[in-house]
Image (cartoon, rainbow, N blue to C red):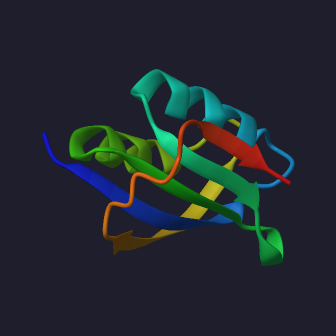
Amino acid sequence: MKKVRVHVLIKGRVQGVFFRAETHQMAFRLGMKGWVRNAWGGNVEAVFEAEEEAVKRMIAWCHKGPPAAFVERVEEEWEKYRGEFDTFSVRY
């Protein structure tokens, strides 16, 4: 299966609701590599690298997030797969 990479910006009420921690857990379950962090304006930003189907499942999850989150929009920027990550991390 084809490996892909996507850079996402998740907008809405997504900080202070365990979005990064839950993203980390979901990424681990899906075998994802990359990172997630809080971004400007109360948003959350992430880079996901994995098999295409896993990345699509991760993006679908990002549209909902954890129970306390309210996701207004997920912006996706598909990039060339680089394979630069060994793990998935929470960046601060």
Please report the residue visible at 42 percent of the width from the left and 29 percent of the height from the top.
Answer: 31
Q: Is residue 66 visible?
A: no
Please report the residue visible at 54 percent of the width from the left and 38 percent of the height from the top.
Answer: 86
Q: Is residue 86 left or right of residue 39?
A: left
Q: Position of residue 90 (x, y in %)?
A: 74, 44
Name the one closer to the observer, 68 or 15.
15
- The image quadrant where one finds the N terminus is top left
Name the one closer to the observer, 34 or 17.
34
Q: Is residue 9 left or right of residue 7?
A: right
Q: Position of residue 47 (x, y in %)?
A: 53, 58
* Quadrant of the rendered image containing residue 78: bottom left
- The image quadrant where one finds the C terminus is bottom right
Please report the residue visible at 41 percent of the width from the left and 49 percent of the height from the top.
Answer: 49
Q: Is residue 87 left or right of residue 48?
A: right
Q: Is 30 rendered above or below residue 74?
A: above
* Quadrant of the rendered image containing residue 44: bottom right
Name the one closer to the observer, 48 or 69.
48
Please report the residue visible at 51 percent of the width from the left and 65 percent of the height from the top.
Answer: 8
Q: Is residue 46 visible?
A: yes
Please, which residue is most extreme toward the left here?
1
Q: Position of residue 9 (x, y in %)?
A: 58, 69
Q: Is 79 rendered above or below residue 89?
A: below
Q: Is 91 rendered above or below residue 30?
A: below
How many circles with numbers are drawn on the protein? 0
